[in-house]
Image (tube, rainbow, N blue to C red):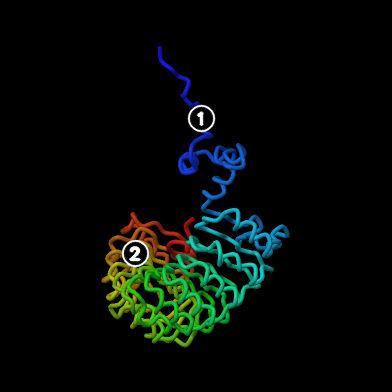
């Protein structure tokens, strides 16, 4: 007869924390994950330490900015409590915390070491001092959104020196940053892949001169770019997406030819919408120098004439989408050149081209029945610039 007097009864509550953490991570149902922490204080602590993503409830997006419920209530005390509770975050969004002061980011010095993605867009109270706290406390940071923040080149330099693993940065609508700050980022962050600088009026593009070949995505809509700045943007040789729509009138006719100089041979998506003065020389250089182009937006490019359209038809062999809305100098012969070339074209955005006859359009539809004709203008092309959680 066996003696069971020394046997010890065990249950799930006797499992070590490591095992409970693994069990929690394997839970697929969100309700199960939320219920996990209701079991006891120990399980609640494991739930907190396992959390990787946190978005403050009053954060807003561009689409509900006007909502009265989005007033920022987060202060240093509450943020400290949140970060003390969730100490292993990879993703943190404080978007729209409009009154959050620099001091509110002090907890990141203690709990930000594992943070990979940080959203601070629309944090109007953030200055260079707050950005320095981020740089000191988040050495692993790979993505940061600083859109519409009151930061300067001083803060960007601190960020560049402290967060050298940075891959994505959004500086759109930051009126106080210039090429000096951009240069600090491009020189210190060798893994930089995505830069968004839309509506940064003090940036001309030279700050990206000599950038890493890792840089693949640049959104520079409505910047005061210069021809040498365009060369700086493409100088890394790895660019695949470029948006320079609405650039200043300082770039005339052949000012965008640098895009086709050979450094942007990997370019797949190009947005030149509202570049009204771009001329045929630039268009021909781009058509020849960017053989991988799949989508090209030339809407409201008034200066493109027959030579430009012929070059696109002849050289853009992989082009799938083309925007020519309101191109004043697209004539019947130009449309014929597009019809006879661009063999992979699948979508053509075309409307309000005053020099085009209805006959030319009908001929295009007849000979290129595989191409979808769209009259509405698609202003945003290519992939959205987003952070992954």
> What is the x, y in percent for residue 190?
37, 73
Give the residue at x 56% y 67%: 109
In the image, which disc is placed on residue 87?
none
Give the residue at x 56% y 72%: 133
Classify mark 1: residues with Cα within 10 Å, few (<14), some (14-19) or many (20+).
few
> What is the x, y in percent for residue 179?
47, 83
Disc 1 designates what residue?
Answer: 11
> What is the x, y in percent for residue 307?
32, 79
Res 187 → quadrant: bottom left
Name the side, left or right, on which 201 lies relative to 338.
right
Dot 2 and dot 1 residues touching (CB under 8 Å): no
Say whether residue 101 is visible: yes
Which one is closest to the eye, mark 2 or mark 1? 1
What's the CA distance linking mark 2 and mark 1?
A: 59 Å
Q: Is residue 371 above or below residue 191?
A: above
Q: Is residue 97 above or below residue 172?
A: above
Say whether residue 300 is visible: no
- Asked which secondary structure carries label 2, the reply is loop
Name the side, left or right, on which 145 lies relative to 320.
right
- Asked which secondary structure carries label 1, the reply is loop
Classify mark 2: residues with Cα within 10 Å, few (<14), some (14-19) or many (20+).
many
Give the residue at x 51% y 83%: 178
Res 338 → quadrant: bottom left
Q: Is residue 83 above or below residue 251?
A: above
Q: Is residue 193 above or below residue 387?
A: below
Name the side, left or right, on which 338 lies relative to 113.
left
Disc 2 designates what residue?
Answer: 294
């Amino acid at each position: 007869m066996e003696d069971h007097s020394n046997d010890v009864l065990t249950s799930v509550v006797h499992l070590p924390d490591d095992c409970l953490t693994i069990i929690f991570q394997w839970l697929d149902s969100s309700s199960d994950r939320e219920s996990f922490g209701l079991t006891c204080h120990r399980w609640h602590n494991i739930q907190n330490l396992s959390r990787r993503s946190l978005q403050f409830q009053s954060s807003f997006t561009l689409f509900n900015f006007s909502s009265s419920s989005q007033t920022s209530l987060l202060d240093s005390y509450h943020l400290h409590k949140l970060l003390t509770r969730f100490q292993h975050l990879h993703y943190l969004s404080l978007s729209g915390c409009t009154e959050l002061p620099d001091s509110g980011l002090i907890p990141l010095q203690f709990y930000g070491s594992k943070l990979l993605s940080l959203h601070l867009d629309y944090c109007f109270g953030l200055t260079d001092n707050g950005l320095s706290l981020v740089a000191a406390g988040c050495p692993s940071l790979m993505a940061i959104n600083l859109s519409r923040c009151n930061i300067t080149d001083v803060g960007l330099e601190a960020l560049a020196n402290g967060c050298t693993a940075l891959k994505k940065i959004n500086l759109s609508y930051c009126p106080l940053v210039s090429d000096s700050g951009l240069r600090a980022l491009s020189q210190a962050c060798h893994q930089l892949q995505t830069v968004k600088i839309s509506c940064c009026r003090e940036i001309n593009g030279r700050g990206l001169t000599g950038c890493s070949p890792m840089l693949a995505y640049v959104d520079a809509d409505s910047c005061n770019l210069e021809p040498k700045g365009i060369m700086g943007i493409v100088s890394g040789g790895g660019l695949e997406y470029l948006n320079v729509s609405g650039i200043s009138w300082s770039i005339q006719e052949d000012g965008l030819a640098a895009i086709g100089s050979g450094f942007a041979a990997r370019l797949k998506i190009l947005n030149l919408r509202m570049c009204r003065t771009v001329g045929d020389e630039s268009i021909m250089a781009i058509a020849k120098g960017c053989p991988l182009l799949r989508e090209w937006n030339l809407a409201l490019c008034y200066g493109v004439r027959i030579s430009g359209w012929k070059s696109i038809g002849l050289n853009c062999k992989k082009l799938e989408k083309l925007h020519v809305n309101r191109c004043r100098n697209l004539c019947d012969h130009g449309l014929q050149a597009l019809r006879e070339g661009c063999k992979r074209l699948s979508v053509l955005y075309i409307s309000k081209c005053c020099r085009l006859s209805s006959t030319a359009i009908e001929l295009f539809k007849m000979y290129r029945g595989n191409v979808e004709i769209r009259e509405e203008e698609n202003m945003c092309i290519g992939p959205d610039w987003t952070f992954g959680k």
